[in-house]
Amino acid sequence: MKKPQKEEILDSYSLFLDRFCIEKESFYTFGIESTIFPPLEYAKSQWDQNKKKLLGNDTLAIRGYGRQGKNTEMFLGLYKYLFKNERIYEDSTNNAAPRANIQAATGHRINSSIYNYQCSHIFGRTKNPILFESVWNMCFVPRIFDPLTGHEATGAWPQEYQELFVKKVCLINEDFIRDFNMFIIEHNISERIKEYVFNITGQYDNKTIHKFAIDAQKEWAPIEIETK
């Protein structure tokens, strides 16, 4: 019996660049340079304001948690416990607040002054109210590159691009990242999340509690600074 030929490996990004004679490095560089970041001065002022909101029982949004947001209440309860903030709410569209924030910061509006851009959270943490709303954790990514920064694309391409992208972001936002990491330590958040999980154990099934315990720690884990 004739052995089947070895499966040929194809990557649509490689095929596209080869077809139009574009070097991969130039493609990556264009993606990073055409990404729109908010002005640092605006980002600093808004970051300080968002921390005050969180600690001062003022309104901030988070993305819904669980299928159709059915377990969002677990995070809302966490913020009542951690910060005595009872005014955190679930974003109506899961992106309304951050999109409005970055449009205000940059002066750009999607489908008005910019087209085919996507509002993206750089480090995720969308159930974390200060990172969900703070513009230093956001950018406008050209839609052609958005899959490379998320989970849609696979293989070596997203890994290579994300490494370059994160290095660029860390150079820009190093002070914000260090301040966020210090905020975690100052408020002893990791241990207090464990206390909250212990307190609500029994109110939900074990699987839901276990997943929430992991997810909550991820939302408040320190961000590693990659600049080399």
Image: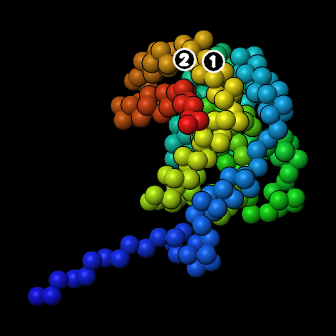
From the viewer's perspective, is 105 left or right of 207? right
Q: Number of marks in the image?
A: 2
Tell me the residue that label 2 is attached to: 189
Q: Position of residue 16 (x, y in %)?
A: 57, 74
Q: In the rendered image, which residue does mark 1 sit on?
A: 183
**Three-letter amino acid code at the position of disc 1:** Phe
> What percent of the width, then of the height, locates residue 135?
75, 37
Residue for point 68% across, 52% down: 32
Badge nearest the viewer, 2 or 1 = 1
Depth order, front residue of 144/170: 170
Mark 1: few, some, or many residues within 10 Å (few <14, many ≥20)?
some
Q: Do tag 2 and tag 1 residues touch (Cβ < 8 Å)?
A: yes
For the rendered model, the colour scheme is rainbow
Looking at the rendered structure, the secondary structure element under dot 2 is helix
Instruction: Classify residue 53 by image quadrant.
Output: top right
Instruction: Say whether disc 2 or disc 1 marks the residue closer to the N-terminus.
Output: 1
Distance (Cα) linking label 2 and label 1: 9 Å
- In this rendering, would 220 be left or right of 98? left
In which quarter of the view is residue 27 placed? Answer: bottom right
Quadrant the C terminus occupies: top right
Check the picture and name the quadrant holding the N terminus.
bottom left
**In the depicted view, which residue is nearer to us: 201 or 219?**
219
Q: Is residue 157 above or below residue 42?
A: below
131 on left or right of 72: right
Residue 138 horizontal side relative to residue 208, left or right:
right
Query: What is the secondary structure assignment of the residue under circle 1?
Result: helix
Instruction: Please name the residue shown 38% across and 31% down the image.
Output: 210
